[in-house]
Image (tube, helix red, strand yellow):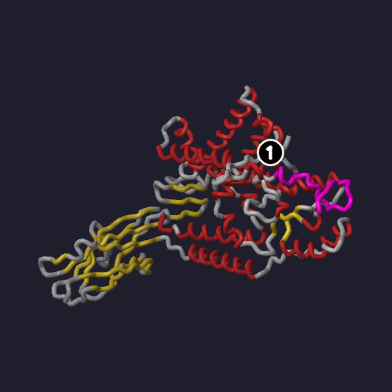
């Protein structure tokens, strides 16, 4: 009987006149080795952080959330341990996203699709789902046989148990996600008693469904058809990037292990059987390859059992691969060709124009974000001038503009500032419901970790000769007479 993977090329062909080919299910085989061990460690680290970070506590004082990482939408705050970001400081998040993007570009230029193969959420959760499938339904051959069997009680038991565990993992994933936006310890009992908000249940259901569908059903189709990264990763890679490659100069021509005149590849297809996207790495660089390196472990295991050197499939640069191929080409298969090809390999060139550009951009972004954080003001003053009406003509002939002042304080203490108006002579400042200091200046008090709003009136005396538009500035002065913050605006009046 022909195995499903050997039927794949013919079965995957579209019907005449059709542009669509039905999906051929991939049955990855379990494998052990150094790469697989590294992937398990990274998987455990990623999932451990994702599920446990919402439970970490951080004391910020009374009346403040003690969850270490929290997106507090209700109060407009993002808490990350000792860092607190306000809505108007969203540029910090933008900087982090830019930093992450450039870092991903740099990592790809050096190590290929290391993100896709080891740390991408789709890869991590799919790995977990496939392991559950192996525990319940068996390894590759057992799963293929199970899918060919009629619907018996045993078939139904294994399938239902698999999907039940998948749903449990997906629900834990959705539950952990909503905890990043709500206090985890306080929300958990409300969630299970039906007292949580509708938004919590909606996002819980959304992330449960997407995790279950993408990791349980879509799998490699997400990487092949839905993810944009494979489409433009070629712009990130060059001949010095480390990628998963098949050393054809050593493996070809293929043949049985006991036959003379053949390369080291015995065409066992072990590399194909373990591939989570179902490709043959021996066909060269392919869009579907996520760079997970499991084919390396599978091939090394076969080479070890045959008593041949490991590394027929390995992480290699295209430059090194081409050098080995050129050196080994004149030699027949055997130990001499193996030694010659390996000796011709070239070390990876880490410092090159591409990596220097990425390093420079990363350093620039870090410097800009660090400078912005170091110069971060704890007090802010926003001035909004009334637009309707533009100005008011008073009964005595004076002209008045009204302003809304929003005073933000990012500290935990109450501060008081005198408000001054910088502008031409003839303008008077008053603030509704504000006290005054000994010099008669309006005094504005802040609200700890909050925003206070004030109504300010600027009046031009009767007979004052002012242009139609006059630049003015509102200035906050602390108790020592130092200017804490200054915000510009404009005073409008009738045409002269």
Residue sticking out furthest to the left = 395
Question: Which residue lies under the disc numbered 1?
Answer: 4
Residues 331 and 193: in front is 331
**Residue under the image location 54 percent in, 49 percent down:** 226
Q: Quadrant of residue 376?
A: bottom left
255 magenta-colored: yes
Residues drawn in magenta: 253-274
Residue under the image location 48 percent in, 47 percent down: 70
Q: Quadrant of residue 49?
A: top right
Q: Is residue 306 toward the left or the right of residue 485 in the image?
A: right
Residue 74 position, x and y percent, is: 39, 46
Above or below: residue 469 compared with residue 139: below
Q: Residue at x 63, y 59 (%)?
A: 108
Secondary structure mostly taken by the magenta-highlighted segment of the chain: loop
Image quarter (top left, top right, bottom left or bottom right) of the C terminus: bottom left
* In front of the other: 329 or 103: 329
Question: What residue is rendered at 43% in x and 58% in y?
Answer: 89
Question: How dense is the environment of label 1, judged by Cα within 10 Å: few (below 14), some, or many (20 and up)?
Answer: some
**Which x, y percent locates residue 323?**
77, 65
Using the image as rendered, state which of residue 348 and residue 60 is in the foreground.
Answer: 348
């Amino acid at each position: 009987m022909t195995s499903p993977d050997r039927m794949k090329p013919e079965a995957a062909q579209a019907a005449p006149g059709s542009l669509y080919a039905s999906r051929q299910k991939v049955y990855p085989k379990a494998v052990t080795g150094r790469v697989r061990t590294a992937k398990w460690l990274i998987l455990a680290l990623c999932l451990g952080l994702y599920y446990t970070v919402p439970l970490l506590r951080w004391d910020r004082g009374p009346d403040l959330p003690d969850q270490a990482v929290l997106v507090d939408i209700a109060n407009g705050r993002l808490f990350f341990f000792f860092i607190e970001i306000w809505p108007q400081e969203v540029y910090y998040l933008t900087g982090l996203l830019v930093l992450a993007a450039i870092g991903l570009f740099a990592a790809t230029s050096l190590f290929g699709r290391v993100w896709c193969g080891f740390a991408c959420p789709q890869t991590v959760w799919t790995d977990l789902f496939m392991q559950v499938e192996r525990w319940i339904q068996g390894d590759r051959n057992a799963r293929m046989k199970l899918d060919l069997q009629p619907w018996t009680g045993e078939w139904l038991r294994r399938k239902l148990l698999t999907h039940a565990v998948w749903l449990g993992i997906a629900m834990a994933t959705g539950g952990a996600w909503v905890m990043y936006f709500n206090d985890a310890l306080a929300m958990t009992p409300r969630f299970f008693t039906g007292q949580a908000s509708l938004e919590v249940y909606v996002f819980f259901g959304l992330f449960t469904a997407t995790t279950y569908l993408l990791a349980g059903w879509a799998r490699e189709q997400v990487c092949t058809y839905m993810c944009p990264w494979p489409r433009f990763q070629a712009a990130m890679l060059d001949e010095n990037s480390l990628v998963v490659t098949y050393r054809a100069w050593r493996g070809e021509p293929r043949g049985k292990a006991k036959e003379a005149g053949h390369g080291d590849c015995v065409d066992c297809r072990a590399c194909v059987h373990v591939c989570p996207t179902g490709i043959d790495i021996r066909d060269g660089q392919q869009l579907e390859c996520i760079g997970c390196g499991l084919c390396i472990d599978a091939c090394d295991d076969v080479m070890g059992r045959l008593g041949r050197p490991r590394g027929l499939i390995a992480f290699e640069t295209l430059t090194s691969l081409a050098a080995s191929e050129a050196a080994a080409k004149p030699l027949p298969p055997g130990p001499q060709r193996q030694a010659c090809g390996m000796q011709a390999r070239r070390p990876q060139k880490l410092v090159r124009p591409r990596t220097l550009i990425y390093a420079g951009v990363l350093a620039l972004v870090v410097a800009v974000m660090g400078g912005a954080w170091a110069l971060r003001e704890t007090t802010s003053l926003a001035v909004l001038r009334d637009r309707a009406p533009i100005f008011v003509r008073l009964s005595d002939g004076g002209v008045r503009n009204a302003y809304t002042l929003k005073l933000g304080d990012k500290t935990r203490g109450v501060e008081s500032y005198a408000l001054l108006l910088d502008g031409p002579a003839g303008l008077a400042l008053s603030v509704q419901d504000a006290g005054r200091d000994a010099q008669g200046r309006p005094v504005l008090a802040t609200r700890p970790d909050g925003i206070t709003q004030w109504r300010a009136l600027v009046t031009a005396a009767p007979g004052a000769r002012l242009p139609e538009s006059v630049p003015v500035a509102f200035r906050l002065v602390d108790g020592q007479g130092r200017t804490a913050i200054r915000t510009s605006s404009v005073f409008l009046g009738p045409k002269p």
